[in-house]
Amino acid sequence: MTLSFDPIEEARRNWRRHGWGGVDAMSAATSITRAHQIVLGRINEALTAVDLNFSRFEALALLSFTRTGELPLGKMGDRLQVHPASITNTIDRLERDGLVERVRHPTDRRTTLARITGSGRRAAERGAAVLADIEFGIAGLPPAARRRIDADIADLRRRAGDF
């Protein structure tokens, strides 16, 4: 459903009218949150064509980028910045689909590795192509705007201790 007005601008007016502080911060945070919903929705919709969602694609991409095609689940969770339960669920689904397999770590029996399969590599490549085709859900934003957004969000993430 498309609204006939900008609800975030309406929220700005209401916050001002009620004398609440942090109007610009509220508006920026709400805009970021809404943009995340829009972009993630577009990404996930596009990835359905290759039977993936973004979290599964990210895991396959990460494994594809490694020298050996495998990583410990804990390290995957750290690099993808997700809770251990989330990476476990993601790997469970990828394993059921034959895109990864769990293997024992060769020197640490406490550690389980996720290893990408040939099918997983092909799925990652198809997913990357689909996402490139839709410009990761941000088609229409000019290159300069993309770079500004990336830099501004990176600054926010850095100040939050994300890296």
Image: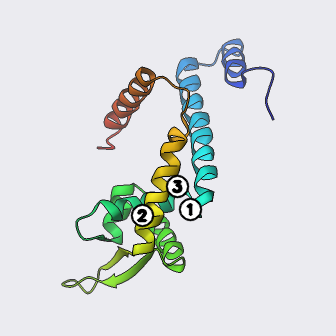
Asked if residue 54 lies left or right of residue 41, the reply is: left
Instruction: Classify mark 3: residues with Cα within 10 Å, few (<14), some (14-19) or many (20+).
Output: some
Identity, as a three-letter code, of the amino acid under mark 3? Phe
Residue 140: x %, y % from top left: 56, 27
Asked if residue 55 lies left or right of residue 3, the reply is: left
Residue occupying image coordinates x 57% and y 25%: 26
Residue 98: x %, y % from top left: 49, 78
Q: Secondary structure at mark 2?
A: helix
Q: Is residue 73 above or below residue 160?
A: below
Asked if residue 156 lies left or right of residue 138, the reply is: left
The mark nearer the N terminus, 2 or 3, is: 3
Identity, as a three-letter code, of the amino acid under mark 2? Leu
The mark nearer the N terminus, 2 or 1, is: 1
Residue 154: x %, y % from top left: 35, 34
Residue occupying image coordinates x 45% and y 22%: 145
Q: Return the residue at label 3.
A: 54
Q: Are marks 3 and 1 in contact (CB under 8 Å)?
A: yes
Residue occupying image coordinates x 18% and y 84%: 107
The disc placed on residue 60 is 2
Q: In whole angstroms, how far apart are the C-alphas of marks 2 and 3?
A: 10 Å
Identity, as a three-letter code, of the amino acid under mark 1? Leu
Q: Is residue 108 above or below residue 57?
A: below
Looking at the image, which is closer to me, 93 or 8?
93
Asked if residue 51 lies left or right of residue 4, the reply is: left
Exactly how many numbered labels are in the figure? 3
Q: Are marks 2 and 1 in contact (CB under 8 Å)?
A: yes
The disc placed on residue 52 is 1
Q: Nearer the viewer, mark 3 or mark 1?
A: 1
Q: Is residue 159 above or below residue 60?
A: above
Q: Secondary structure at mark 3?
A: helix
